[in-house]
Image (cartoon, helix red, strand yellow):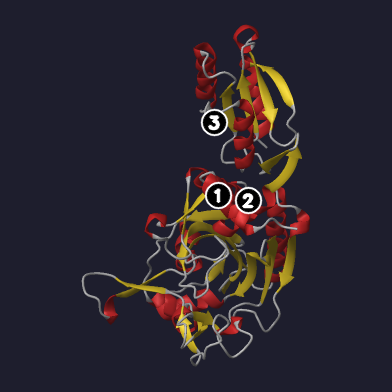
Amino acid sequence: MPVEMEKIVSLCKRRGIIFQNSEIYGGLGSTWDYGPLGVELKRNVKDLWWRSVVRERDDMEGLDAAILMHPTTWVASGHVESFTDPLVDCKKCKKRFRADDLEGESCPECNGELTEMRRFNLMFKTFMGPVEDEGAIVYLRPETAQGIFANFSNIQKAMRRKLPFGIAQIGKAFRNEITPGNFTFRTREFEQMEIEYFVKPGTDQEWYDYWVRERFDWYIKWGIKPENLRLREHGKDELAHYAKSCHDVEYLFPMGWSELEGIANRTDFDLRQHEKYSGRDLHYFDEVTKEQYIPYVIEPSAGADRATLAFLVDAYREEKVKGEKRVILSLHREMAPIKVAVLPLLRNRPEIVEMARRIAGDLRGHFKTVYDDTGSIGRLYRRQDEIGTPYCITVDVQSLTDKKVTVRDRDSMEQDRIPIERLREYLLGKLIQ
């Protein structure tokens, strides 16, 4: 059974992973701040994704498109007209609900009468320039994909790319969700890790199947237990209007099976729409076959926040050690926010402290390393276990004479005595995959 979300939320606040946004003012609904350890963890998730889909491949380019785009972008994509949720209000308690989430005809909170359903556009609207009128309306992007589509021709020509090839992007998106919740699972401001992979029509099914397998296996590679993942194919009645097919990678979150990533065959819908509304030719010319066509697009779209939450939940475990509870985040070593903690056994011995600080300084150029002497060695170990630090290095009295330190493994708690001069080599072998 997955861990209760309350335990994850408590751990995140206690150890500086994730905080409630604007907490000193009572908080802002469904917005979260990543603390010192959280920003390292999320950055590692994004870096491992980027490494897997861009740097280790020869068929992918990167992009960082602006959040604000020409407003016609969202007309062409269909967001202005159809990016909506059905909304009802309770006339008694004034709370709002998604109509498709309700089972009865009355308010689930107070049993009051509900208003008629109306459509609610999820895009955040703002104004560009000093005058707030209809001509100055722009939107905070609800997805990163449209920035990729708008730049397809630029990137294809500038990088002299032939099909098939992809464009990857990590960036912020914003959706004015009616019912956000479940910690960082559904928020109004979030970060996407998205690929648009452009292929020749007729080869799209082959590439769709490839990316479904590729993206499912990525989560297992970096530590998610296979039994907590599954693939779910969308039924014809739930496919987006532009999609030929879609699979969700689902994870067993504390609230049940929920979407972690979606892989969709978007056909040529987006490029055709942008060609129509912009008046620009977005056809691809195949120099080998002399054919000209608009590519089909396979879209693996993941959430950096959901992925971070899934890795946190999956790594959390509790066990008894000598009658005491030990909490461990068994994160993949390359995903852990801190890789090495250096701990002096006696903080009142200046020569031990000096040696420990020197070791920590030497390692910082190679791994995310911390020095900590704010408790007993047992307490320091437990603190590092809770935040997922793979290795703790203890400097003791004997280290002063034999020039060796004790390296403790987070998961097994086994200890090795390693010469200081071999320490970096030893850790490189353990931490770098």
Disc 2 or 3, which lies upstream in sequence?
2
Residue with the mark numbered 2: 312
> Of residues 376 and 172, which is closer to you in this image?
376
Q: Which mark is residue 12?
A: 1
> Of residues 328 and 194, which is closer to you in this image?
328
Q: Secondary structure at mark 1?
A: helix
Disc 2 crowd rating (10 Å Cα; few below 14, some 14-19, many 20+) is many
- Tell me if residue 424 can be seen: no
Q: In the rendered image, which quarter is residue 110 located in?
A: bottom right
Q: Quadrant of the N terminus?
A: bottom right
Q: Are marks 1 and 2 in contact (CB under 8 Å)?
A: yes
Disc 1 crowd rating (10 Å Cα; few below 14, some 14-19, many 20+) is many
Q: In percent of the image, x 62 and y 11: which residue is there? A: 403
Amino acid bearing label 2 = Leu
1 vs 3, front mark: 1
Q: In percent of the image, x 52 and y 22: which residue is there? A: 362
Amino acid bearing label 3 = Thr
Q: In percent of the image, x 57 and y 37: which residue is there? A: 338
